[in-house]
Image (cartoon, grey):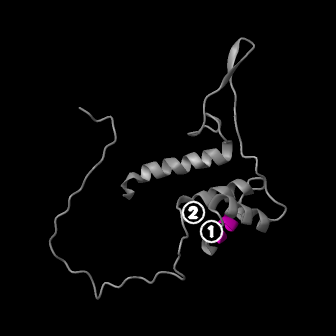
Amino acid sequence: EFQILTPPYFIGYLNGMSSLINSGVSYDCDNAKSLGVRVQVPEDGRWRNVCPKGEFMWREESSINTTLENLDLLLTGGRLTPVSRATVREAYEQAKPGEELQAAQQAVVMTAEFNTLGASIPRPGVRPPTSHGGGAQKRPYKAVVMLFLAGGADT
């Protein structure tokens, strides 16, 4: 069931979300893949690209705590786990001045809580390392290796 979300598609999704957060709904405004439509207007007998066409209007609150609580509520329905919340706070605090909100938004859209529905149930603590019981056994095996060369090599 989950095979339709392949790594290239998910990376494209994250790039699109990042572009949406940084440039708004626009076309070719940040020299990256963008979300939106291309709009041109005539000006002095030439066509000029209009950029950006839309942007997020929600702004930061007076304190970092209120800002992060509202981001959690707006983007995940209040479902951020303490670990994710700490990650978002760290992204906010380590961002360049003036880019804190965008950094926090990007951190939120990469969380499991943003990308899934329902309550996440994280397990507390760190997963213990698995033990293999004394070492690996050497035995012959066969493997199938598939190379997916995406396009261009049809001949």
Q: State which region is magenta.
A: 85-91
**Residue drawn 60% across and 31% down?**
37
| Residue 87 appears left or right of 12 | right
Residue tagged 2: 111
Picture coordinates of residue 83 (x, y %)? 61, 73
Picture coordinates of residue 147 (x, y %)? 28, 49
Toward the right, the furthest residue is 62
Toward the left, the furthest residue is 140
Toward the front, the furthest residue is 118
Compared with 141, 33 (above or below) is: above
Residue tagged 1: 80
Name the magenta segment's main secondary structure: helix
Disc 2 vs disc 1: which is toward the camera?
A: 1
| Residue 5 appears left or right of 76 | left
| Residue 60 appears left or right of 6 | right
Judged from the image, the secondary structure of the residue bearing numbered disc 1 is loop
Contact, mark 2 vs mark 1 (Cβ under 8 Å) = yes
Q: Which quarter shows the C terminus?
A: top left
Q: Amino acid at mark 2?
A: Thr
**Residue drawn 54% across and 83% down?**
125
Picture coordinates of residue 66 (x, y %)? 78, 66
Task: Count neighbours of disc 2 (C-alpha within 10 A) and say few if under 14, some if 14 to 19, many if 20 or more.
Answer: some
Compared with 2, 37 (above or below) is: above
| Res 143 quadrant in image | bottom left
Of the numbered discs 2 and 1, the one sitting upstream in the chain is: 1
